[in-house]
Image (cartoon, grey):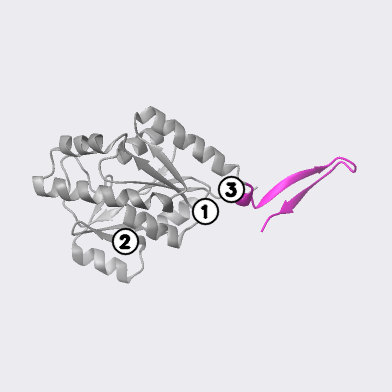
Amino acid sequence: MNKTGLLIVISGPSGTGKGTICKALVHRKDYFVSISATTRNPRVGEVDGESYYFLTKEDFIDRINKDDFLEHAEVYGNYYGTPKSKVLETIESGKDVILEIDIQGALKVKENYPNGVFIFILPPSMEELKNRITKRGTETEESLMTRFKCAYKEINYISKYNYAVVNDTVEEAVNKIESIVLAEKCRVDRIKTTTILDSKEGLIHEQLYD
């Protein structure tokens, strides 16, 4: 049987609770969480190498030139990117990888790795989304409005994803994502070989799928 892991891409507008959902998923199962690199400044409580790899703009551009990223994008004036080698090595080893990423980055990952599972996280309502962003306390009035306007535009990209999950409660959202992952592992087109029992001859052999 094919033992290649899944790349599970969790994405959606800012404030939908992507980070909280990913933490809850990891608490339930031993997923590998891909850590993104960024040139933005750390927020309160964020740790380099755990929350993000915080890089200078010069270092980030140097890594782009070395093809060190599975994807990279500029968002709100800062660069974000997904280190490539660790993600691909982990998937090949048979372990599932969770990638929490912005929409621009997710679409670029889909171009480079279309076999991933792309899940779009939605808020219960746009009013609730605005409340969640406001409660962070990290945005100016101007940046808050910028993010909220972008969220309206970003929701239009939902058709580019495989699945949509409304984050009404974290527990329900996580349950749905776990069901999605289980279903994806059972897809015939993900199975490279399958064991078949020949009832007449009692022989077991492998059948390959393209």
Q: Does residue 101 appear in this view?
A: no
Q: CA distance from mark 2 to mark 3?
A: 28 Å
Residue at 55% in and 43% down: 184
Bounds of the magenta span?
A: 188-210
- Judged left or right of residue 69, residue 89 is right
Is 39 within the magenta? no
Residue furthest to the right: 200
From the image, tell me which residue sits under label 1: 92
The numbered dot on residue 3 is: 3
Mark 2 or 3: the one toward you: 2
SS class, disc 2:
strand
Q: Amino acid at mark 2?
A: His
Q: CA distance from mark 3 to mark 1?
A: 8 Å
**Viewer-side residue, 46 vs 155:** 155
Mark 1 or 2: the one toward you: 2
Residue at 44% in and 62% down: 112
SS class, disc 3:
loop
**Viewer-side residue, 115 vs 123:** 123
10 Å neighbourhood of mark 2: few (<14), some, or many (≥20)? many
Is 198 within the magenta? yes
Q: Amino acid at mark 3?
A: Lys
From the top left corner, tell me how far across and down residue 203 is, in percent.
Answer: 84, 44
Q: Earlier in the sequence, mark 3 or mark 1?
A: 3
- Judged left or right of residue 136, residue 177 is right
The numbered dot on residue 72 is: 2
- Judged left or right of residue 100, residue 47 is left
10 Å neighbourhood of mark 3: few (<14), some, or many (≥20)? some
Q: Earlier in the sequence, mark 1 or mark 2?
A: 2
Where, quadrant-wise, is the C terminus in this rendering? bottom right
Residue furthest to the left: 141
Q: Does residue 76 appear in this view?
A: yes
